[in-house]
Image (spheres, rainbow, N blue to C red):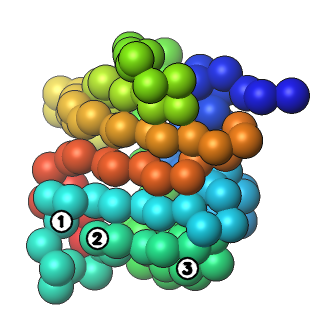
Amino acid sequence: MSRTPREIFESYVYAGAVSRDADALAEAFTEDGVFEAPLVPADAAFPRRLEGREAIRAAMAAHYARQPGDGRAPNLAKSAYVLHTTAVPDVFIAEIDTVFDGEGRGEDDVTVSLVRIFRVRDGRIARLRDYFAPGLVS
């Protein structure tokens, strides 16, 4: 049974941004899946391109391990997204506004806008291009 773009997108977000589960994130990809973050500089700690489920698993586990202990997660109730289907049945685009709550003391919420292009095969991500401001990751 094939999954819908919404199911694929939401499970990807939950595995990554919400639970930071590198195993679940990697399992969202095909065995030969590709993750790309084209705007990230080649010398950045965050991966710019990963090929294969195991490379995705290892690199994202290392990335999550480097994250601060406060685990600041997105506020899903304030965040929003729009999925755009395309003329190509295995491609969809996610337009995302992720909101992080202000840390108190009168600080404003922070909204991070990004675009992800998904190419899927058999209900898994075959290629993901993640376009976001590279300064957001360490």
Q: Residue at x 34, y 61 (%)?
A: 36
Extreme right residue here?
A: 1
Give the quadrant of the N terminus: top right
The image quadrant where one finds the C terminus is: bottom left
Instruction: Please rate how many residues cluster around mark 1, counting C-alpha atoms within 10 Å: few if below 14, some from 14 to 19, many from 20.
Output: many
Return the residue found at the far bottom: 43
10 Å neighbourhood of mark 2: few (<14), some, or many (≥20)?
some
Is residue 43 at all visible to an observer of this figure?
yes
Position of 17 with respect to 29 (left or right) is left
Dot 2: element: loop
Residue 9 is situated, as x and y percent measured from the top left of the image, at 55, 32
Residue corresponding to mark 3: 55
The answer to the question of whether label 2 and label 1 lie on touching residues, with beta carbons closer than 8 A, is yes
Q: Is residue 70 left or right of residue 114?
A: right
Three-letter residue code for mark 3: Ala
Q: Residue at x 53, y 24 (%)?
A: 89
Q: Which residue is mark 1?
A: 40
> Looking at the image, is mark 3 or mark 2 earlier in the sequence?
2
Relative to 67, say whether 98 is above or below. above
Instruction: Provide the secondary structure element on which disc 1 rests.
Output: loop
